[in-house]
Image: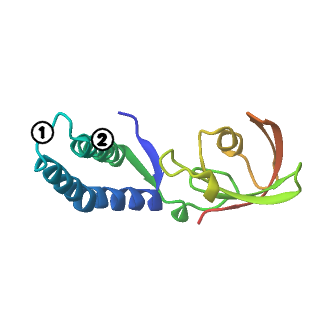
Amino acid sequence: MEKEPITVKGLENLKSELEDLKNVQRPKIVEAIAEARSHGDLKENAEYHAAKEQQGLIEGRVLAINDLIARANVIDVTKIENEGKVIFGSTINVFDLETNKQISYRLVGQDEADIKKNLIFYKSPIGKALIGKNKGDMVVVNTPSGERNFEIKDVQYI
């Protein structure tokens, strides 16, 4: 069983999602199944089948979260001395040389990744290119849309 790196915030988010699934979503779906059963014949009862399918999705997610938590290797970058090196959990300010824009990324685990929030998976093309680099380094990233060039302006452990 391979350990999966996760940030402190990522672990908190997983635990709150698990809490919601167990204490809010599960009881609602059990109630929906009971309601659908009371309508009679289960063979042609679309409400019942939809509720059972939803129950399966919830239970699958509960199992996945429990597995992630069991394998979690929590990394708190605020407790690591910042030497300007890009590591898991660090926030990196980069300058995109093509668009002349400054972008801030944070390297996170797979379950936390959300490109809309600039949270990128550390094994993604950009994550792989950035990890191990230092403040001031030039980075070439091979993305599906072509090659991109960045300059690392700042590395923060926040």
Give the quadrant of the N terminus: top left
Residue at figure coordinates x 13%, y 48% from the top left? 39
Identified by mark 1, the residue type is Asp
Would residue 20 be found to the left or right of residue 79 on screen? left
The local crowd at label 1, few if under 14, some if 14 to 19, many if 20 or more residues have their Cα within 10 Å, is few
Mark 2 or mark 1: which comes first in sequence? 1
Residue at figure coordinates x 71%, y 40% from the top left? 129
Identified by mark 2, the residue type is Gly
Residue at figure coordinates x 13%, y 52% from the top left? 34
Estimate the x, y position of residue 25 in percent, counting from the top left.
27, 57
Estimate the x, y position of residue 47 in percent, counting from the top left.
25, 46
Residue at image mark 1: 41
Task: Classify 22 as above or below 37.
Answer: below
Q: Quadrant of residue 116?
A: bottom right
Which element type, helix, strand or loop, lies under badge 1? loop
Residue at image mark 2: 60
The mark closer to the camera, 2 or 1, is 1
Estimate the x, y position of residue 89 in percent, counting from the top left.
56, 55
Q: Quadrant of residue 27?
A: bottom left
Q: How many marks?
A: 2
What's the CA distance linking mark 2 and mark 1?
27 Å
